[in-house]
Image (cartoon, rainbow, N blue to C red):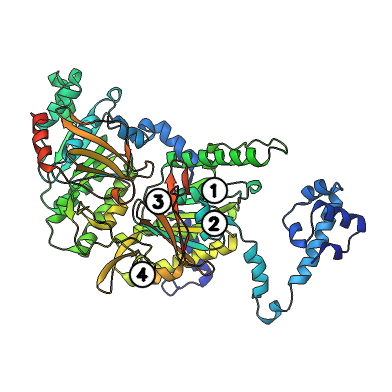
Amino acid sequence: MELLDVGLTEVRSALLQISEIVAPPYQTALSLMEQRFQNEHLGGHFPTGLKGLDAALCGGIPFGVLTELVGPAGIGKTQFCLKLSLLASLPTNYGGLDGRVIYIDVESKFSSRRLLEIGLRSFPEIFQMKEMAQEMAGRILVLRPTSLAEFTQSLEQIKVSLLQNQVKMLVIDSMAALVSGEHEQGARRQQTLSWHISFIKSLAEFSRIPVVVTNQVRSRNHDDASRYCFQVQSRDGAIETPMQYDSHLVAALGIQWAHAVTTRLVLEAKSGERFIKVAKSPISPPLAFPFHITSSGISLLSDDGKEVMGPEINAIHYQGHNEIINFGMEGLH
Amino acid sequence: MEIWRLPISASQRGKLISAGYTSLSSLSSISSSDLARELKVSESEAMNILKVASHSRGSETSNASCSIVEGAQSAWDMLHDEESLMHITTSSADLDNILGGGIHCKEVTEIGGVPGIGKTQLGIQVAVNVQIPNDFGGLGGKAIYIDTEGSFMVERAFQIAEACIEDMSEYNRFLRKDFQECKIKMLPQDILENIFYFRICSYTEQIALINYLDKFLSEHKDVKVIVVDSVTFHFRQDFDDMALRTRVLSGMALKLMNLAKRFSLAVVLLNQVTTKHTEASFQLALALGDSWSHTCTNRIVLYWNGNERYAYIDKSPSLRSASAAYSVTARGIRNSSSSCKRIKMM
């Protein structure tokens, strides 16, 4: 009131009018559904080619939100990203999005040779022709930022060119590597990332594209909280003693990041087998699918997911390490 | 006040009592055409009866309390209000039990938990359940869903709506099979049509929307629940000035409480979790700080206990601390299926 030198009633009505204009318009959930089914590919889902996973996720990776792939090193996150990028570049009759893919490769793991090998094995009819292979591979644009600042800059440029250039998917591999290079620890690190989280989410939302982000794991330390204050104080011993986690691994980037992603797919290894587990999803129950890596990318060993319960949902296992490395090598060459 | 004291003719009195209306409050929510049909009298007679009834009720309640302080209501009158409070069921009987029937209307309930525990699922379930018609014990109202994170999946809402209609048909078949055969005419699409969806992309939009809701609600008076999923997201990201954040948040909470009371609706705020350092150990706590924890009327924490999901009433003026197990199924929130579950009173 003092700033504008007007009375309270005018300020109130001005506030109401401004709020009305600034507030976003509403939609009924029904019109939202109809709009998505009419305008978007498969009602807003990108099929990954893994039938069991697609069925659980109601069609595939959802548009407009963040999907996270988290798992220990060497489990197959980058392989999955390569396969997805390839799929997105394909024309729609092959199950693709027929558009460009922006691949932000922080750890320099992108291998175009491997990409073309996957293409050749999975879709020989397209990739055997050199021009088609060139066209498809040409749609995947790889960015290699060396610092968080560079990444921030690229993000802002991406936002501008997203709609103009028919970009249909964004892959960030990996998010944790971006932050690990920075100096701050703990809470400050989370704050550094919070602007990026917000920005990437709004990018995904306004362009309605699937965004896939990979994340690393780190070992559990004593700072990790897992109980509420009312759980600790229980007197009659009804709460069991803290679970003995045999995994000791948790996803990096903290709990704020865990809230921000909409779908979390955990890739882990248990007793020599690899599993891809839907740990967080608004539409799927927690299911784990066994998978393996072949020359044509990643494929499920079974389309029936195994239901996962309780603390197993968020645990990340990495057992049977050595056997996997040897087993994997045969598949890759 | 009893019906037999009303200044109406003896035959009308007799008809009222035989039709089952034995107290004034039972006449408070019926329309004159319904009453005319029930009593088999003309509509003008029914209107007369209702007018007389409301007169007597009015003169009874406007007692001395108003003259002492303007706008005050005595606790006895508030008791009547509280007892006639409507609840929104959560579709899990155990959860409804510890909540005293369900999510309370005219109150702000905050629900928080770790990622993946089912907050959005509960939000969608409440937005669907508020639409259960009066005949089935619901409110028959519409819902506003304010999405700040993009976690609202229309397909999931459709699934939950479908399951809700199936449950209603089942109940119908079970209960009313000796009376007339009334089919459920609702379709999942109708339920989705009654959910007003707002997508918020920044905290300014969030504040603006809460300001705008007043006008929106006056235009859409049948909205009975507002779900905000989640109230935390935008306030965790770029706020440097914590004091400003606290002020903005409490302003928002007050406005929501005001809306809840004026329009008799329920407000459900979903919150995230953060780690708090207390007494040399790190614990989980709901986000947004200590000042925020005072602003909501009721607070429910969703957490994992072994393999089960549990809900714990952390704070409530009228409910005692208790926890109950629930589960998230393909049909929505339901009772936990484990055989050793029990409601634990603290």
- Chain that bears disc 3: B
- Same chain for mark 4 and mark 2? The answer is no
- The answer for how far apart the CA atoms under marks 1 and 3 are is 16 Å
- The answer for how far apart the CA atoms under marks 3 and 2 are is 17 Å
Which of the labelled discs sits on residue B118, or is there none?
3
Name the quadrant containing residue A222. Answer: bottom left
User: Which of pointers 4 and 3 indicates the residue nearer the eye?
Assistant: 4
Residue B73 visible in the shown view: no
Q: Mark 4 points at which residue?
A: A233
Q: Mark 2 points at which residue?
A: B102
- The answer for how far apart the CA atoms under marks 2 and 1 are is 10 Å
Q: How crowded is mark 1: few (under 14 residues within 10 Å), some or many (20 or more)?
A: many
- Can you say which quadrant of the picture contains the N terminus of chain B? bottom right
Q: Name which residue type carries label 1.
A: Asn
Where does the image place residue A302, in percent across and percent down from the top left? Answer: 27, 31
Q: Name the residue under label 1.
A: B129
Q: What residue do we see at 87% from left, 48% from top?
A: B41
Q: Name which residue type carries label 4.
A: Gln
**Element assignment for label 2:** loop
**Element assignment for label 1:** helix
**Element assignment for label 3:** loop
Q: Name which residue type carries label 3.
A: Gly
- The answer for how far apart the CA atoms under marks 4 and 3 are is 24 Å
Q: Are marks 2 and 1 in contact (CB under 8 Å)?
A: yes
Where does the image place residue B258, in percent across and percent down from the top left? Answer: 54, 65
Q: What residue do we see at 54% from left, 48% from top?
A: B129
User: Which of pointers 4 and 2 indicates the residue nearer the eye?
Assistant: 4
Q: Name which residue type carries label 2.
A: Gly
Q: Are marks 3 and 2 in contact (CB under 8 Å)?
A: no
- Same chain for mark 2 and mark 1? The answer is yes
Where does the image place residue B58, in percent across and percent down from the top left? Answer: 76, 68
